[in-house]
């Protein structure tokens, strides 16, 4: 329930602080007084569209703050102790305005705010007729009326449709890529065969072969050089070899040690050197003896080197990279051949999923037909008291290709006049008829709609007399389930209000606002005496002034008293037990609307005394004894 609405610098509002109560809250005032601006602010704070023009001229920001009774997420329990405070600030900029949202003082996004809207607020106005005429919106309304079971089945359909679409896309991709897949498979197969034939085993094989080829290409030179080294180390043909020199040095040091043991370490080093030189000489001699030319082996090695270098150029750069590439190719070929589903398998999968989707859609269609039957009966009965005694209403369900919302096209068709065929609602309903249809629809949906606050913006425009009386009763009955805010020019509706507010434009002087004279909007809660004056004015518009007091014609005042008296009687009769809004005593099929039945319930009579003139409502003089809550 909306408890408080605070507005600053929004359109013509400088400052307003409004407190609302449970039940039916009515806002009245002269046409153009700014009643809808209050509702626009309420729409804006819950994520509605705004523009830079919403910010009051001369200011750079606007503030709207709405306080609601908090509703538990998983039930309808209301917590009045810890209210929910939603705040929106509009800030002017060079390229329009930007918004800052907050929930209970914490920064929030527009998405967060709009998620709360469906639970806390719903605004109904004649402008909704465009949306109401859209088949997609009509389908959503029917599904909502069908209840949680139908909504759950619709989610099943959405899940089936999503799964089917993914499989269909996978199949389509596979079909389009089949030619490319075969080309890739041929290429990969060729490359694998080339690498397999190369018999790659070690990433060091190429380096080893290069060394071997180098040795085989220089056998003669290596033989000569090894013989020279052998002579220098161990056995020189001319002069002394290193081993001979070290042997002489060793013998001399051995004699010296006999006289001075301090040089024993030096003797040990020379002895070790002699041993190593001798071993090196022998090894060098053996190496030279083992060298021999092998042209056949050299040819084999060079051929292998050429093969490996070509592999490295194509799959390298290194031999190790080529070995890794071979493993990757094997995996890709497996995926292209046996690793993924075949086209036949994918086609079978798509067919199975389509059958599941079709079955789910048929189940959803059956549930929609059941809901449509109930809605037809319920809505027809709700429309009959609104001067549509012979109205016919039908929900047509036509099969279409499956979508995430099912395989049905839903169309609301009606015939408000006897003898006329059923036609789509959007193409035949007048403004007044659409207003009554919208109100009846909200009455039907009040039993399944969990929204706390319902707002009606001049939904009674274009109606009068008995129809206005029934609209007033319907709004009051709605207020037994929801808090209702209503902007109206109908005295019949205003008389039923639990809380009545008067909206008026005022011009404040330079002394009051510190600037040039400005137009502002003020909202006044009406006392019982003020309500009588307001209702009389709404009914007749005849105002006589005398001094500081305001008076109306006796006939208008008597009519206002009659309205309030009858409204009190009806409210007492309806009471809190009236929770079945416009529920027919005997349900009838919509193809044969039930005959009009008399009722003992008191109705607010629309017929005014002969002396009361039906004119455009006029704004009360400023000297009404009202206390502004701005």
Image (spheres, helix red, strand yellow):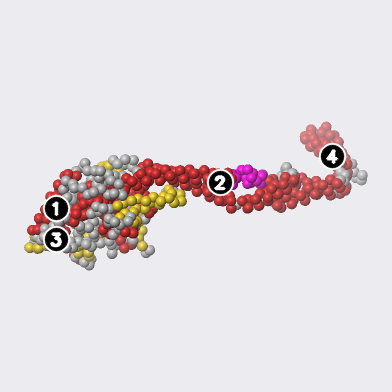
The residue where tag 2 is placed is: 347
Relative depth, front residue between 514 and 346: 346
Marks 2/4 in contact by CB < 8 Å: the verdict is: no
Residue 230 image position (x, y, % from top left): 87, 43
Residue 458 image position (x, y, % from top left): 24, 57
Is most of the magenta stretch helix, strand or loop? helix
Numbered label attached to residue 540: 3
Q: Which residues are magenta?
A: 327-343
Real-space Cα distance between discs 1 and 4? 130 Å
The residue that appears at 19% across and 44% down in the rendered structure is 574
Real-space Cα distance between discs 3 and 2? 75 Å
The residue where tag 4 is placed is: 283
Secondary structure at numbered mark 1? helix
> Does the stretch in magenta take in 104?
no
Residue 193 as seen in the image, left or right of residue 419: right
Real-space Cα distance between discs 2 and 1? 71 Å
Disc on the earlier residue, 1 or 4: 4
Disc on the earlier residue, 3 or 4: 4
Disc on the earlier residue, 3 or 2: 2
Numbered label attached to residue 563: 1
Residue 622 as seen in the image, left or right of residue 49: left
Tag nearer the camera, 2 or 4: 2
Disc on the earlier residue, 1 or 3: 3
Residue 416 image position (x, y, % from top left): 28, 55
Mark 4 surroundings: few (<14), some (14-19) or many (≥20) residues within 10 A = some
Mark 2 surroundings: few (<14), some (14-19) or many (≥20) residues within 10 A = some
Residue 561 as seen in the image, left or right of residue 249: left
Q: Is residue 611 visible?
A: yes
Mark 1 surroundings: few (<14), some (14-19) or many (≥20) residues within 10 A = many
Relative depth, front residue between 163 and 502: 163
Residue 181 as seen in the image, left or right of residue 440: right
């Amino acid at each position: 329930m909306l408890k408080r609405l605070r507005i600053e610098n929004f359109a013509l509002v400088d400052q307003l602080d409004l407190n609302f109560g449970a039940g039916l809250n009515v806002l009245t005032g002269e046409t153009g007084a700014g009643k809808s601006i209050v509702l626009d602010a309420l729409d804006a704070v819950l994520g509605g569209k705004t523009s830079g023009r919403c910010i009051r001229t001369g200011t750079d920001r606007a503030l709207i703050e709405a306080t609601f009774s908090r509703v538990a997420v998983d039930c309808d329990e209301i917590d009045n102790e810890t209210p929910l405070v939603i705040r929106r600030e509009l800030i002017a900029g060079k390229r329009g305005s930007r918004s800052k949202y907050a929930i209970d003082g914490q920064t929030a996004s527009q998405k967060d705010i709009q998620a709360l809207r469906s639970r806390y607020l719903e605004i109904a106005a004649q402008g909704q007729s465009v949306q109401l005429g859209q088949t997609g919106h009509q389908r959503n309304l029917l599904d909502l009326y069908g209840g949680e079971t139908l909504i759950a089945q619709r989610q099943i359909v959405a899940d089936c449709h999503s799964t089917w679409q993914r499989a269909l896309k996978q199949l389509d991709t596979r079909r389009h890529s089949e030619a490319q897949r075969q080309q890739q498979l041929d290429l990969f197969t060729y490359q694998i065969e080339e690498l397999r034939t190369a018999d790659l085993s070690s990433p060091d094989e190429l380096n080893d072969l290069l060394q071997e080829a180098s040795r085989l290409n220089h056998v003669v030179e290596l033989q000569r050089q090894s013989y020279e080294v052998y002579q220098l180390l161990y056995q020189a043909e001319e002069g002394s070899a290193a081993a001979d020199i070290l042997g002489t040095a060793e013998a001399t040091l051995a004699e010296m040690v006999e006289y001075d043991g301090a040089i024993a370490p030096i003797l040990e080093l020379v002895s070790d050197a002699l041993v190593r030189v001798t071993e090196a000489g022998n090894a060098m001699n053996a190496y030279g003896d083992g060298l021999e030319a092998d042209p056949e082996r050299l040819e084999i090695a060079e051929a292998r080197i050429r093969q490996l270098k070509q592999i490295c150029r194509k799959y390298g750069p290194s031999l190790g990279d080529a070995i890794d590439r071979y493993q990757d190719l094997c995996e890709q070929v497996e995926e292209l051949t046996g690793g993924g589903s075949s086209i036949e398998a994918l086609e079978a999968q798509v067919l199975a999923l389509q059958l599941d989707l079709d079955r789910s859609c048929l189940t959803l269609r059956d549930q929609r037909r059941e809901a449509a039957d109930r809605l037809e009966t319920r809505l027809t009965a709700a429309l009959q008291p609104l001067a549509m005694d012979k109205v016919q209403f039908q929900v047509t369900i036509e099969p279409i290709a499956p979508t995430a919302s099912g395989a049905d096209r839903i169309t609301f068709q009606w015939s408000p006049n006897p003898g006329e065929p059923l036609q789509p609602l959007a193409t035949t309903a007048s403004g007044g008829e659409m207003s009554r249809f919208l109100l009846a629809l909200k009455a039907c949906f009040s039993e399944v709609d969990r929204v706390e606050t319902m707002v009606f913006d001049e939904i009674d425009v274009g109606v009068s007399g008995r129809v206005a009386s029934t609209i007033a009763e319907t709004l009051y009955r709605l207020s037994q389930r929801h808090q209702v805010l209503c902007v109206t020019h109908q005295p019949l509706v205003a008389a039923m209000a639990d809380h009545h507010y008067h909206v008026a434009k005022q011009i404040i002087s330079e002394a009051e606002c510190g600037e040039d004279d400005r137009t502002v909007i003020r909202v006044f809660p009406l006392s019982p005496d003020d309500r009588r004056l307001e209702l009389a004015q709404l009914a007749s518009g005849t105002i006589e002034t005398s001094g500081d007091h305001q008076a109306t014609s006796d006939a208008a005042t008597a009519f206002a008293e009659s309205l309030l008296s009858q409204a009190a009687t009806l409210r007492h009769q309806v009471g809190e037990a009236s929770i079945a809004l416009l529920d027919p005593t005997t349900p009838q099929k919509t193809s044969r609307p039930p005959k009009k039945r008399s009722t003992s319930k008191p109705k607010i009579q629309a017929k005014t005394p002969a002396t009361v003139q039906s004119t455009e409502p006029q704004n009360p003089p400023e000297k009404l004894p009202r206390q502004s809550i701005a």
